[in-house]
Image (tube, helix red, strand yellow):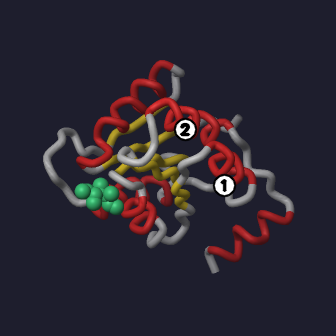
Amino acid sequence: MQDLKVVIGSDHGGFEYKEVIIDYLKSNNIEVFDVGTFNKESCDYPVIAKEVAKKIVSGEFNRGILVCGTGIGMSIAANKVHGIRASLCGDTYSARMTRQHNDSNVLCLGERVIGENLMLDIVDIWLKTEFEGGRHQRRVDMLDK
Ligand code: RB5
């Protein structure tokens, strides 16, 4: 498994899951940097998504996790940044496949959509699954052109 350097962010709608994920990553000795939000006051998901995306495309971190109420706003915002392949996942199969086939570098989650145990399974699988390369590399390359 590649060395994981994770940058994480949420808006108010994803704040509680962000905290759960940070505890989970720390207890598994995975490096994690939190860009906020740091409380449950209403804030704007595009700002947080951009912060996380910038830290991925700069090479400072190799994986990003974004949580909002549905995960949808975060995924729309993150995917506007060139070089970001953000995947909104609500099941473990998609989490595995988006790593194997899409080389997903940002995972988006919806706190108001899925339960905590499923959410942590998705995080775990997404972090541990390697990109398959081969024919998928060509397709991933096409995304950035
Ligand atoms: C905030 O209420 C909510 O709109 C946000 O967390 C997210 O679900 C947007 O896509």
**Residue at label 1?**
98
Q: Of all residues shown, which one is farthest toward the bottom?
A: 145
Residue 22 occupies which quadrant of the picture? top left
Q: Is residue 58 shown left or right of residue 142?
A: left
Quadrant for ligand 1?
bottom left
The answer to whether 24 is drawn above or below residue 40 in the figure is above
| Outermost residue to the right | 134
- Residue found at x 24% / y 45%: 37
Q: Report which quarter residue 14 is drawn in.
A: top left
Numbered disc total: 2
Residue that badge 2 annotates:
123
Task: Kindly indicate whether the residue at mark 2 contacts the one at mark 1 (C-beta within 8 angstroms).
Answer: no
Task: Using the image as rendered, state which of residue 134 and residue 109 is in the foreground.
Answer: 109
Residue sitting nearer the eye, 87 or 131: 87
In the rendered image, the quadrant that contains the N terminus is: top right
**Label 2 neighbourhood size at 10 Å, few (<14), some (14-19), many (20+)?**
many
Task: Indicate left or right for 123 with 145 as reference.
Answer: left
